[in-house]
């Protein structure tokens, strides 16, 4: 019984930190400006609590990113069409990429901060390896498609956060145009026609 209160406090603090970090990254102009001290102050916890719970800034970003990504991950791994396993591969690949692009657009500052926070190769990050593995496994179901390992990397490169940010912020490409461009690129890679209404809201 005496141990329950600390665990409850830790869970409450963790949620407060994630909520505060979520607000700060959503509202910021430059994700690099958001510090651990800012998050601790916004959450009403000490910096020590923050570091004990998440380790460091990349650890906090990873936890927040994964929390936001969870609904999409579940839909892709076990949900219904067009993202889930029952979807024909030639339809599932563009749907997965479009969903990833929409996620990056909806979480631009966080996605950019997260992808830039790891000093190691981004291609070794757990979330990237998981997404690459899923996409590769779907590509392997398409007859005649060669080198699915590289193809999965190339398709995911089109939805990297830094590219999405560049297109949205520097080149002012509208959201639906970006989605249509991605659908066209994916269709070219797969050797199919772009789906009707590519770029329309889901």
Image (cartoon, rainbow, N blue to C red):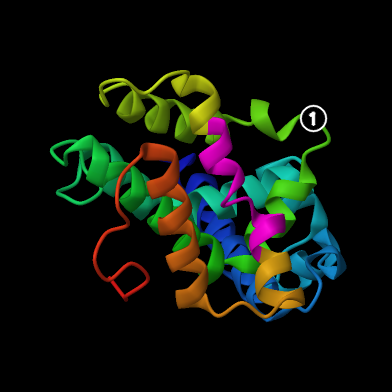
Q: Could you tell me residue 19's position as x and y percent?
A: 56, 68
SS state under label 1: loop
- Quarter of the image for the N terminus: give it: top left
Q: Against 27, is 100 above or below?
A: above
Kindly identify the residue that appears in the image at 45 percent across and 76 percent down: 176
Kindly identify the residue that appears in the image at 78 percent across and 66 percent down: 31
Is residue 18 rendered to the left or right of residue 90?
right
The reply to whether residue 10 is visible in this rendering is no
In the rendered structure, which segment of residues is drawn in magenta? 153-164
The prevailing secondary structure element of the residues shown in magenta is helix
Q: Could you tell me residue 140's position as x and y percent?
A: 33, 21
Q: Nearer the viewer, residue 139 or 85?
A: 139
Q: Nearer the viewer, residue 135 or 65?
A: 135
Q: Characterize the local packing of mark 1: few (<14), some (14-19) or many (20 or more) Cα atoms within 10 angstroms.
A: few
Q: Which residue is mark 1?
A: 120
Q: Is residue 144 highlighted in magenta?
A: no
Kindly identify the residue that appears in the image at 30 percent across and 45 percent down: 192
Q: Could you tell me residue 141's position as x and y percent?
A: 25, 23
Please count the marks in the image.
1
Q: Is residue 157 highlighted in magenta?
A: yes
Hey, which quadrant is residue 54 in on the image? top right
Q: Against 53, is 107 above or below?
A: below
């Amino acid at each position: 019984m005496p141990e329950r209160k600390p665990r409850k406090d830790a869970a409450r603090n963790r949620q407060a930190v994630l909520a505060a970090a979520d607000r700060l990254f959503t509202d910021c102009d430059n994700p690099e400006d958001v510090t651990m001290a800012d998050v601790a102050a916004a959450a009403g916890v000490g910096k020590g609590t923050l570091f004990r719970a998440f380790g460091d800034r990349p650890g906090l970003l990873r936890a927040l990113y994964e929390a936001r990504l969870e609904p999409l991950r579940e839909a892709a791994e076990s949900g219904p069409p067009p993202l889930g396993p029952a979807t024909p591969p030639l339809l599932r690949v563009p749907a997965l990429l479009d969903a990833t692009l929409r996620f990056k657009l909806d979480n631009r500052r966080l996605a950019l901060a997260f992808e830039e926070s790891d000093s190691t190769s981004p291609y070794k990050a757990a979330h990237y390896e998981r997404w690459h593995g899923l996409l590769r496994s779907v590509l392997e179901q398409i007859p005649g498609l060669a080198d699915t390992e590289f193809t999965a990397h190339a398709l995911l490169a089109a939805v990297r956060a830094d590219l999405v940010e560049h297109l949205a912020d520097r080149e002012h490409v509208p959201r639906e145009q970006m989605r249509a461009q991605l659908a066209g690129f994916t269709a070219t890679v797969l050797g199919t026609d772009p789906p009707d209404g590519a770029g329309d809201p889901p």
